[in-house]
Image (tube, rainbow, N blue to C red):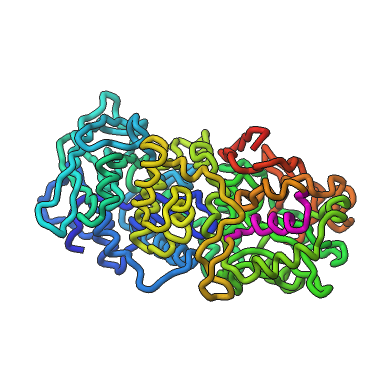
Amino acid sequence: ENQLPNSDSSLFSTMSRWHFSLISAVLCLALLFVWPKNELSARRLLELVPREPGQLRPAVTSWSGESLLGLIQPSGGFFPDGLLRYLVNATINVCEDYLKHHTHDNFTDPYPYWSFVPITVGGAGGYLLTGESMQAAPADACFKVNITAEYKRRLIPGFSDYVEIKIDASRLDAPCKKKENEDLYLISTLGDFTLIKVTKPGLSTHTVKVGKETEKAKILDTETRGVRVFHILGTATEAVWALLETVRLFEPMMGKPDVSSGGAAKNVDFLNKYAVQNITLRTGQINVDIPEDLIQDGDFFGLRRLDGLDPMLSWAMGSSTGHTTMAMRFDGVLHVVESTANSNYWPVNGVQKTEWKLWLERYRKADYAIVHMPLSAESRAKFNVSAAREAFSREYEGFDYGYSNMLFSWLDIVDGNFPCMPKEASKQGCLAWPVWELLVAQLERLDSSIAETMFIAGQRRRVGLEGGNWPEVLQAAYEKFGTEHVQKMVTLPEQDSWTYNTTRWGKAAVGPARMCDALVCSLWKAGGLFGGLKDEVQCAEFTNWDAYGLKLFDADWPSKRPQVCKDNDPDNDHCQLSGRYSLKLKTPRYTWNERDLVPHLAERCPSLAPKYDRPADC
């Protein structure tokens, strides 16, 4: 606590996706900036401790990531889902406390979600080499700044090298349009980050730690690639409010299994604005039952829960759903097979099967929207359910959820996958690769096991390393692809044959990593639906729409579905079995049953909202 400056500062930041995609992925880093261990630390971080009388406000204030991480380091280990719930709860409390103690007008921005995510500064993609300088005057800036970075060697063995950052700020000719004269910057290495607020003209000096003499990859990264420079749009108070509104999307993951009407409405607002989905309240009954014998082996179920996570995945992927499952009978009894994680509504972790009635009851209690989509007669005749059932039991059942490669189903070409703010929003920006590098570096410091499972293992494989931490992976990518193409490593397609350190039935094991749609695809493949292309299609590269977009289903099903489905949801092509809001397997760009199976399907596809345009061959 004593390391923090007693100055004007505010909490804002970056976010990421936690346990299933994330795209996303900046929530975790944002939470690093606002998660204190106790009330006094929170108030210190949020400037609630008053200054001494007569103390002047400095022109520029800053504080380091290292001191913040010392406050937020959790005790004990987490699974990715548990860490996210922990961070969500803490962030809501701290942001609400901040806004309670800071004077501000009522916020009216209709596009607050994710608008606090840092955007890169400068013409070199956000990188500033040491020994050089850059000028910056972002679109909403009050000041023009000249930023200079100088590498400084440690004077005492055992201490860290650091980069000295000098910021020379001057007013722009045009008047500042913000309610407060302040610009927010974030400057980082792989060893640390510094948050900076510019409030008036002047010269100031800041430091960012690089690494100790034993942390060679961190040092090499800064020497060869420089520091990363970001700007955060708006004022600090606006950024904290935007962070709070975004994290509130995830509130349904806390507490009871059901989703509150307010939480659902907020997530619908997000999806309709950011992914341009026309989600409406259903006017018929919420739960619709269909005959069990109507559901055949291999049939598809698409699901969505308005809990922050599924909508975020839906936005990133360009799909209507956030989860996918398959029907399959075992000993004549209808089950649903899926890859999922235990949570506040689901008691079992990993790849599993659940009897139909119990499965439906649990998901209905959790306020899931569920649609059933049957295979076509041709696909049913072709599907070898015995082979698929054997593959499920022998190769997949009991393994942990596919954390290790879930991100690579979404990240294909980087620049066309990281989402952007809607064009209608007043704050414009996109998630970018330098933010991704920073996110993983800080997550590795916070919880190395989660960083290893979700981010590092898959990327390490792509640069040919047997071991190594995140800075070592990036250095290997730099040597393999060059400084301007480090991000190329995530574009190398995931292979279904790859295995990872994971668990099976709760015990350490080496095996496949399958998230929800990859499991569905793998079982279709095992059952023969891909024919001679089975070795040329990698299911681990699939998103939700890649699965339900395939031409495997009954095109005439909208007219053939049971009358109760037509009466209850006349505008839906499928039987919606639950959910207060509509779930249609359509987006403005894509629909179900429209995609031919071709070699290397889904390996190099963009996924940018709202149009989600893709080349025909991806």
Q: Position of residue 105 (x, y in %)?
A: 38, 46
Q: Position of residue 406 (x, y in %)?
A: 55, 55
Residue 207 or residue 245, whichever sits in front: 207
Q: Say which residue appears at 73% left-offset and 68% top-offset.
A: 360
Q: Is residue 75 placed above or below 233 in the rendered structure?
A: below
Report whether 168 appears left or right of 400.
left
Q: Is 414 in the magenta?
A: no
Q: Say which residue appears at 59% left-offset and 62% top-offset.
A: 512
Q: Which residues are magenta?
A: 513-531
Residue 70 or residue 616, whichever sits in front: 616
Q: Say which residue appears at 35% left-offset and 55% top-offset.
A: 442
Q: Is 525 in the magenta?
A: yes
Does the rendering let one see residue 499? yes
Q: Residue furthest top?
A: 173
Q: Position of residue 518 (x, y in %)?
A: 64, 55
Does the rendering let one see residue 192? no
What secondary structure characterizes most of the magenta part? helix
Residue 252 or residue 64, whichever sits in front: 64
Q: Is residue 143 placed above or below 342 in the rendered structure?
A: above
Image quarter hosting the N terminus: bottom left
Q: Say which residue appears at 89% left-offset and 56% top-offset.
A: 563
Q: Position of residue 57 (x, y in %)?
A: 16, 46
Residue 539 or residue 138, whichever sits in front: 539
Report whether 164 appears left or right of 457.
left
Report whether 311 appears left or right of 52.
right
Report whether 311 appears left or right of 582.
left
Image quarter hosting the C terminus: top right
